[in-house]
Image: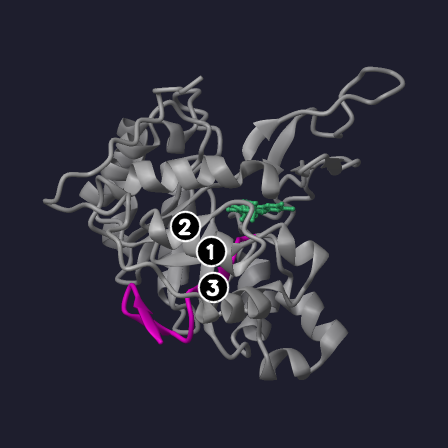
Amino acid sequence: MIEFCGLPLAHPIVNGSGTFDAIAARRAFGDALLKDFPFSAFVSKTITLAPRAGNPPPRLWEAQAGMINSIGLPNRGLAGYLEHDLPQLAQLPVALITNVMGSTEPEVAQLVEALDERPEIAAIELNVSCPNVRTGLDIGADPASLAALMRAVRPLTSKPLIVKLTPNTADVAAVAVAAEREGADAVSLINTLRAMALHPATGVPWLGGGSGGMSGPAIRSVALAQVAAVARHLSIPIVGMGGVSSGEHARDLLSAGASVVAVGTESFRDPCAGTRIASELKSLQIAESPRIGVKTSEPQPEVDLNCVDS
Ligand SMILES: Cc1cc2nc3c(=O)[nH]c(=O)nc-3n(C[C@H](O)[C@H](O)[C@H](O)COP(=O)(O)O)c2cc1C
């Protein structure tokens, strides 16, 4: 048993938002899913204020060591989530973390305020990798924009707030520090890396959305570096994710400074991956040496994302 943002978790493995549809899984596996739920907390797919249809197909591209998706956040919107999805997700045997995204501060504020009223929801994850129409920057790529958003929404909920960071930024640690300073209870990273695939015959973009986000094994070492870079500067817990498909991968992220590890793309290949990875992790001897990313007074190896060894 571990504690994360005041929530007791049976083990450190959760799901990455948008990569495990618990409602569809319940339809497929019935109550067996509830008896052996693969994750110690469930993170919902991102919800937005208004319903979204998502991007036009094709939405997926299988790369050599990962997947590029351009799903485009299809969801029922806040009202549809509260009416249709929440009652079903509340039946899961684990804590529910609801992931939200808005394009403006008032939109995010409305989402957070509405979720704060619902006792079924244990924590809120803010997906801040959406284009900010005001500045033209991704909110999550710019420490000042994120700080302003946090100042607007932090007072609106007493639930734990987890900020999901984008890897598509020059200095992820600066963004993470802004999140912590403005009252985030945790950060999670990494989201997908901006990526593109071309149609092999025509050379035009394959994905209906033009470009997409890379996930899976290809991004694991990027995730490790970013989690380590962030952990050196933060005191709040980190949810590490990106390309995890085994207990060893999860242990690596914990060693880099994460407290909890999320499994994403691997669940498409193996819906029981969470259970397997949690059990593999348990059987591994976690090294006693200091975590390379954790903030400490002891001298630390320098992890500098801008320093590329060749
Ligand atoms: C098909 C797909 C859909 C996703 N949808 C969301 C989403 O709705 N919200 C979000 O914050 N992250 C979303 N993600 C990102 C994942 O939660 C995770 O951050 C990322 O995929 C890296 O982990 P992985 O390599 O284990 O998949 C999605 C990823 C994939 C592959």
Q: Quadrant of residue 150?
A: top left
Q: Earlier in the sequence, mark 2 or mark 3?
A: 3
Neighbourhood count class around disc 1 (C-alpha, 10 Å): few under 14, some 14–19, many 20 upward: many
- Mark 1 CB in 8 Å range of ligand 1? no
Find disc 1 in the rendering and name its residue: 250
**Percent x, y for residue 57?**
79, 36
Q: Quadrant of residue 120?
A: bottom left
Q: Mark 3 falls on what kind of element?
A: strand
What amino acid is at disc 2? Leu
What amino acid is at disc 1? Ala
**Percent x, y for residue 135?**
39, 21
Find disc 2 in the rendering and name its residue: 253
Q: Mark 1 falls on what kind of element?
A: helix
Q: Which mark is residue 13?
A: 3
Q: Which residues are magenta?
A: 1-17
Q: Are marks 2 and 1 in contact (CB under 8 Å)?
A: yes
What amino acid is at disc 3? Ile
